[in-house]
Image (spheres, coloured by chain):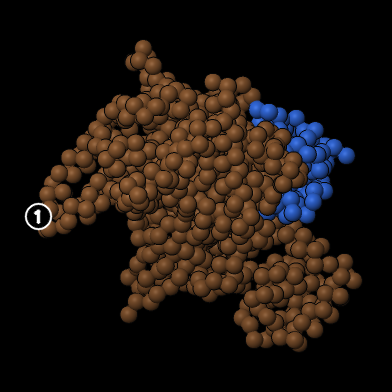
Chain colours: A brown, B blue
Amino acid sequence: MTAEKTIALAGNPNVGKSTIFNALTGLHQHTGNWPGKTVSGATGFFKTSKAIYTLVDTPGTYSLSAKSQEEEVTRDYICFGNSDAVLVVLDSTAMARNLNLALQIIETGKSVIILVNMLDEASRRGIKINLNKLSSILGCPVLGVSANKKKSVKKIGEALDNLPAPSPFSLDLPAPVNKALDSLSEALFSETNRRFKSLNLLLEEKAFIDKINPPDIFLKELETQKKLLSEAGFSPKALSEKIAEIRTRKASEIAKETVTYEKTSEDTRSRKLDRVLTGKYTAFPFMLVLFLIILFLTISGANYPSEMLSKLLFSLEVPITSAFKAIGLSEFLIALIVDGAYRTTAWVVSVMLPPMAIFFPLFTLLEDSGYLPRVAYNLDKPFQKCSSCGKQALTMCMGLGCNAAAVNGCRIIDSPRERLLAILTNSFMPCNGRFPIIIAVITLFFAPAFLKGFSTIWQSLLLLLVLGIAVGITFLINKILSKTILKGLSSSFILELPPYRKPRLISVLVRSFLDRTLKILIRAIAVSIPAGIIIKLLANLTIGGRSILFYLTSILNPIGEIMGLDGIILAAFILGLPAAEIILPLTIMIYTEGGSMPMIEDVTLIGNVLRENGWTFLTALNFLLFSLFHWPCATTILTIKKETGSLKWTLASCLIPLSVGFILCAFTNLIF
Amino acid sequence: MSSLLSVPLGERAVVLKISTEKELLRRFYDIGLIPGATVTCLHKSPFGDPYAIEVSGSVIAVRKKDLKKIFIKEAKIN
């Protein structure tokens, strides 16, 4: 019979935890919201000859002391979750720091298996680790993991099959503390792992008080011991600091005993790269060129596949219609399904899929290489000026992929005020759903014919400019918010700059496709099918001879005119609430009298439809601005509600971009 | 007392005392920045703040105002 066990995977950020997770589980996994930034733990499965294991990935953290949400998730899962054992991943190039977390996890009394990762990089830098010695000091199995994943997976499986008893390791605490813990453990008779729990109750860790619900006899003893310890100079606060210091010291002691450095262990490659990538004169030019290249590759690479896809999908319309006719569906239903649902979906897929399939892998490569934290490092000063922090730059970058994921990712920001700033302004960054719209409008209205040969470069530059506007407005609104409703000074910030690492190409391609592209595409399709049907209905159901859509757009028209747009565009934005990628298709669908989207195989034809309906250079400009600043998509709004837990801030996250968009559009409309 | 901010880029110093507020202090402890630890000042960001420092094998960005509160032993080791 095979047993079933649950294993937690823990470690510092950037230690290659996801690589190990992927190697173990292969494709048998459900991922969290934003891979690489495990915010809501991913789970996966793998089998050995003896058991089936459920592997639960936890967010990368430096400590279990629960100072940020991510740490709380990890702490709660390891201390109170259902795991049978914990795999702790250590980065062999920074053992002292990594051991600190390992010690904390061992102290919880769980069965622990230590995985020392990045051994290849360590040996390149002349770092040698005595795994056997480490294992005997820590009292738990220690496995070395290197690039040869197959071998490593086998080793980990074997270790899990022979799960060790929890390690007896404990810190050398000051004598009075030890004495206090002895009598406290005794009073906590009904619990397992009493010493660890007693210590946390002594330190007044709230989660432990809530979850353990200790007996009265313990609480009485707790008060006595607290008093005794305070008299000995260990108030809960002082004690918690003291223990952290003892542990850090122990961790570096163990590292000294088990790690040897052959030559200079300095990461010279990272140092050299940093000299350029964070250099005073080179950092920003490099950043701009890098983003330009990514945009260029996305635009130029997406053109042709987009065209092919739309040709293919639209050519299927005829056979689908005749198939429906053959099974005897009514004309009305066929129109609803084919002209409404199918055509909208075909549009969204052909416009969205190619740029997404190119942008996401490129972005994941960047993320994998260790460059993104440098963006935060380079930009921290300007963010400081707006009473925020450089980590917001990271969440903005995530926003380029998907705003909802980025709002989730704002958890990396410790200060609640700064996190709220980042959440409220995140939708300013055009996500991958809005990218294709912006690219299309740029192509149609802002690429003069004489630039023929260079048009892609020109489009990329304009797109970069659009991003620049989004970033500029983010700074401005940050500043305004931190002077008004989110008053406060920028808090302290520390950020790890991990070593640069060669991205793992294949893994990046597979992951970014499965986690990002496919997920977002499915969501877009799920949204465009009902949206297509609703539009079709609104356009075809009539009251007093006029369609409902007509009434809607007429009401919106005056507002649209103030903004240099029209009622139809605004209606498309409102109907596009579930997913921004359908806004442009919807606009065109409403313009074309037939009440369904036109079959368009050539982008320039879209331009003709728009121009025939009164679009000018100014309309296009305002459309661009409004697509940057209106309201977050429905998924993002829900995520904001979940993350802030407040209706007020959720509302603010919609009203702030809306006001910005309205003011900007009204302004350009006035001056031009 | 001199702080980490006074250490020239590329040079090392030993931490004597850290007097930041509690939250940040714990963060520093978590990454191995405790009294007695050796810290290398590596480089500063393009706008001059924050700085990148290396402690127990990892590189950390810390703002100037916090570096000022990390005091070092006078004699520098090279």
Label 1: state its secondary structure: helix
Left or right of A556 on screen, residue A258? right
Give the image location of residue A274, x and y in percent. Answer: 58, 31
On the image, numbered disc 1 is attached to which residue?
Answer: A326
Left or right of A375 on screen, residue A241? right
Give the letter of the chain under mark 1: A
Give the image location of residue A384, x and y in percent. Answer: 70, 37
Is A348 placed above or below A39 here?
A: above
Q: Quadrant of residue A234?
A: bottom right
Is A453 placed above or below A459 here?
A: above
Left or right of A473 on screen, residue A364? left
Give the image location of residue A25, x and y in percent. Answer: 38, 59
Is B10 placed above or below A36 here?
A: above
Residue in the image at 41% along x and 27% along y: A615
| Crowd band around label 1 with a 10 angstrom C-alpha radius: few (<14), some (14–19), many (20+) | few
For the C terminus of chain A, give its image quadrant. Answer: top right
State the residue lying farthest toward the left: A326
Q: Quadrant of residue B72?
A: top right
Give the image location of residue A332, x and y in percent. Answer: 22, 53
Amino acid beneath label 1: Ala
Comparing A152 with A31, the one in front is A31
Residue in the image at 75% along x and 52% along y: B25
